[in-house]
Amino acid sequence: MKMLNLYDEALLMFNFLSSSTNPQHLARSFLWLGRIGLILQIFLGFIPLLVVVAYVLSQSGQGLIGGFSFGLWLAIACLIILMFSIYWCFRYTNLANKLRKAETRPSKSQVVRHLQLGLLANIVILIITVIIALFRVGELTFKLLTLPQGATVIAPNKIGTTLATPGALITPSNMIAIQAMLNVIAAGLVGVIVALLLLYKVGKQP
């Protein structure tokens, strides 16, 4: 009987220790994955932000609304959501501090909802950016198809040359725009991976 009581006490102590250490491991996961997501999304979102700001400034002389296309509005909305995702990765690091303390520790359902919102934001980023990329790359592909057969140089027309019509040109700004879209897709993918990893770790907790 005494041995049974000792076994029960040891089992209770083990359960107590495991429940007290698991949130600490989870807090470290939130801290490090939140930092990684924050740094990568800031790095990847820098070029798209510069591209959109430069284009908006170049269109300022044409009127704020009239110079904006539907694709540009989508790009601006996507960048706003990306900035929210960057802020949400920062919230992951704040959540790590709350998980360390029993008195400030949120419930499992609250943590899951927090992660689901971050996951949803990054999925929306991916959807919007892929739609923009499909239309933009399709437009550039159509321009390439209008070039003369066997043409190897794509450059603005000069006097006395007939390389291509002005509407069929691919400029460096087009390639910068494609790079910006790839960066946003990569940033959204980082956010999705971070949220899924944290959801997996939270799901393993009792």
Image (tube, helix red, strand yellow):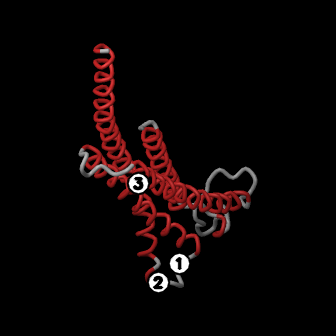
Q: Earlier in the sequence, mark 3 or mark 2?
A: 2
In the rendered image, residue 144, in percent from the top left (x then y), is placed at 68, 57
Secondary structure of the residue carrying tag 3 is helix
Q: Nearer the viewer, mark 3 or mark 2?
A: 3
The amino acid pointed to by label 3 is: Gln
Q: CA distance from mark 3 to mark 1?
A: 39 Å
Q: What residue would you read off at disc 1?
A: 68
The amino acid pointed to by label 2 is: Leu
Q: What residue would you read off at disc 3?
A: 110
Could you tell me if residue 23 is visible in this image?
yes
Horizontally, residue 143 falls left or right of residue 174, namely right
Q: Nearer the viewer, mark 3 or mark 1?
A: 3
* Front residue of 48 and 170: 48
Compared with residue 84, is residue 104 higher up or lower down, i.e. above or below?
Answer: above
Q: Residue at x 60, y 58 (%)?
A: 133
In the rendered image, residue 28, in percent from the top left (x then y), is placed at 30, 38
The amino acid pointed to by label 1 is: Phe
Based on the displayed image, in which of its 4 quarters is residue 27 positioned? top left
Compared with residue 79, is residue 184 higher up or lower down, i.e. above or below?
Answer: above
* Front residue of 170 and 10: 10
